[in-house]
């Protein structure tokens, strides 16, 4: 039984607040970086690129602010929203507070698919990184579900068994990824891939943003369309069945969408962990447990969280960029432990 919903913001309030908060976060991610640039210069570059002014700007400032920082902030926002919503959907479907694409091995499977395409040459250049990542993500989740079922649980309904199977599956696919890198990659490729596997936004540009934005929109649209379904699954599969929800096809649709979103984001930024675990729980404390308010709050907080994490990764060590997955893990690991302790006490 879930706790009663807390007072939450109305839909009109979300329509007013969310764009302003997201815009402020994007501006923050663009203005702050390794090199200090006057805020007036940032505004001049952005207004010129958006067609709001025609001031003369230097090529260097344009490259750093628009083509590097702004594109990076947009991808971070899309990735954060997509991963956070993926975690929210999985937690509702599986009725498990620890469900997350990273912990269930979906991110690890997507990473393996990317490495098999880019390093091992699977598909001979016909298969793209995104297709490889999606295939790997679905394969990983299928393996985890099968392992949970064979371990004496009831497939995806067994919360504890599923998490253990997810950890085992993640380790297996991470080992497979390391084996492929060791066998097929050169020393230079191995260094770049290992840095990317920890989560990196260093190489993203506007073409990556044009791919990430529709995928993030798909995640938001799918979650908003199924808010009542997610509420029903939170009470249990029996309650969802009583309401006339087709359990099998609904799970297939939502899990496939989650795998697709995770796979595309992993193919762009690498495996970034704990976003789908931490953000939904923080939002439940703020807006309550009803998905009508929880979905937009999770998408917004996920976007802001990853933008801020990216900024921290760039400035925490002067002259060096830390993988963003390290920053999210430093926040997510203590949160993971706190969730486990609170769950055991309950």
Image (tube, grey):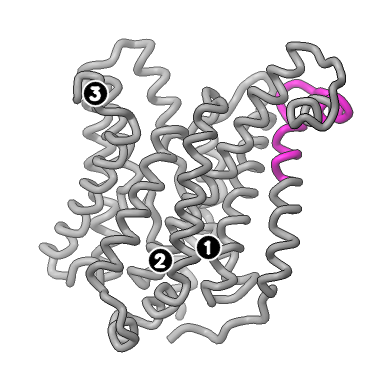
Which part of the image, by quadrant, shows the N terminus? bottom left
- Residue count near mark 3 (Cα–Cα under 10 Å), binned few <14, some 14–19, many ≥20: few
Q: Give the range drawn in magenta.
A: 25-43
Depth check, mark 3 against mark 1: the one in front is 3
- Identify the main secondary structure in magenta: helix
Residue ID at (24%, 35%): 175
Residue ID at (59%, 71%): 293
User: Is there a contact, CB below 8 Å, between mark 2 and mark 1?
Assistant: yes
Q: Earlier in the sequence, mark 3 or mark 1?
A: 3
Judging by the rendered image, the residue that carries numbered circle 1 is 280
Q: Is residue 16 left or right of residue 253?
A: right
Residue closer to the observer: 28 or 165:
28
Judging by the rendered image, the residue that carries numbered circle 2 is 91
Q: Distance between the residues labelled 2 and 1?
A: 9 Å
Q: Residue 182 sits in which quadrant?
A: top left
Judging by the rendered image, the residue that carries numbered circle 3 is 126
Give SS at disc 2: helix
Q: Which of marks 2 and 3 is nearer the N terminus?
A: 2
Residue ID at (73%, 18%): 62
């Amino acid at each position: 039984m879930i706790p009663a919903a807390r007072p939450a913001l109305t839909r009109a309030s979300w329509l007013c607040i969310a764009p302003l908060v997201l815009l402020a976060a994007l501006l923050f991610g663009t203005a702050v970086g390794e090199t200090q640039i006057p805020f007036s210069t940032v505004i001049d570059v952005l207004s010129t690129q958006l067609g709001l002014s025609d001031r003369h700007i230097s090529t260097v400032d344009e490259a750093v602010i628009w083509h590097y920082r702004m594109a990076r902030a947009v991808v971070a926002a899309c990735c954060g929203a997509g991963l956070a919503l993926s975690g929210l959907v999985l937690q509702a479907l599986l009725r498990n507070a620890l469900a997350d694409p990273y912990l269930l091995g979906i991110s690890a499977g997507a990473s393996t698919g990317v490495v098999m395409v880019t390093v091992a040459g699977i598909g001979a250049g016909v298969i793209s990184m995104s297709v490889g990542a999606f295939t790997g993500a679905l394969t990983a989740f299928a393996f985890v579900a099968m392992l949970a079922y064979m371990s004496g649980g009831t497939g995806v309904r067994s919360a504890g068994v599923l998490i253990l199977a997810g950890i085992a599956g993640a380790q297996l696919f991470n080992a497979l990824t390391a084996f492929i890198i060791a066998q097929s990659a050169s020393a230079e490729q191995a260094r770049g891939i290992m840095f990317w596997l920890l989560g990196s936004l260093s190489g993203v540009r506007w073409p990556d943003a044009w791919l990430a934005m529709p995928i993030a929109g798909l995640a938001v649209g799918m979650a908003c369309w199924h808010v009542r379904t997610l509420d029903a699954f939170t009470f249990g599969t029996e309650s969802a069945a009583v309401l006339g929800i087709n359990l099998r096809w609904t799970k297939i649709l939502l899990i496939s969408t989650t795998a697709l979103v995770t796979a595309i984001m992993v193919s762009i930024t690498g495996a970034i962990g704990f976003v789908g675990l931490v953000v939904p729980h923080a939002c439940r404390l703020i807006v309550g447990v009803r998905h009508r308010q929880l979905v937009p709050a999770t998408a917004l907080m996920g976007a802001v969280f990853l933008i801020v994490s990216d900024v921290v990764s760039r400035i925490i060590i002067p002259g060096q960029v830390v993988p963003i997955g390290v920053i999210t893990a430093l926040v997510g690991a203590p949160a993971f432990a706190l969730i486990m302790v609170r769950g055991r006490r309950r």
